[in-house]
Image (cartoon, grey):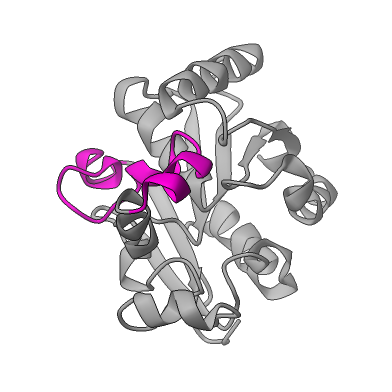
Amino acid sequence: MVGKDTVVLLHGLSRTKHSMRRLEAALSRRGYTVINVGYRAGRRPIENLSDDLGARLAEIGESPERRVHFVTHSFGGILLRYYLRDRPLPNLGRVVMLSPPNGGSELADLLRKLPLVRRAGGPNRPRLGTDPAGLPARLGPVDFDLGVITGDRSINPLFSWLIPGPDDGFVAVERAKVRGMTDFLVVPRTHTFIMNSRQVIEQTLKFLRDGSFDHSTHA
């Protein structure tokens, strides 16, 4: 029952919870209790961010009658995977990830080769590489009900030149995928603003409700 369910929002790197406001409003209108989590990914490593997330989730509780869903953007999806790897939630509902670097990012690979830029990128960005030792690869497959939406439009021609295949300006379409996901959808949106798309919001609401996207329309 939607009225008893909670949706936790996790924004991306270099963003704030304000970037998820439109999603927050749409979810609230549908009857969800929404917790829009802000965190400082540019300063705190993922280990500490995971502990912080755990503290917020403890405030919700683990009532079986109240499912907890998640909607994440970019690094927020990696943070959630990191958390759930060691701390499964008994009342976990469905998860929608928007533009997640589930397979890492070629931009993070490049960042590791540039020491000055690497330091400016904070403690988490350089760890999002595509190699087997990178954080995304070490998280393994997912074992929860997950829908992934990613874009194939870019406003960063230089970044797109560095990324093989279709991309959203930061993450290759193929890199958004992860083993175990339930559904996958590509939309004509960019990485930075995908969460503001009306169509993406509607697809997110549908997955939370039904566990699948609507592939009959192009978002």
Q: Position of residue 130 (x, y in %)?
A: 25, 56
Magenta residue span: 114-143
Picture quarter containing residue 52?
Answer: top right
Q: Position of residue 92 (x, y in %)?
A: 47, 32
Residue in the foreground of this view, choosing between 196 and 146: 196
- Regarding residue 152, the answer to whether it shows in the image is no
Q: In the image, what residue occupies the spot 66% across and 39% down?
A: 1
Please give left or right for residue 203 compared with residue 107 in the image: right
Kindly give the residue lying farthest to the front in the view shown.
116
Q: In the image, what residue occupies the spot 58% across and 20% down?
A: 57
| 213 up-or-down from 13: above or below | below
Q: Position of residue 17 (x, y in %)?
A: 73, 41
Task: Specify whether residue 120 is painted magenta.
Answer: yes
Please give left or right for residue 200 compared with residue 96 in the image: right
| 44 up-or-down from 11: above or below | above
Q: In the image, what residue occupies the spot 51% across and 73% down?
A: 169
Picture quarter containing residue 147?
Answer: bottom left
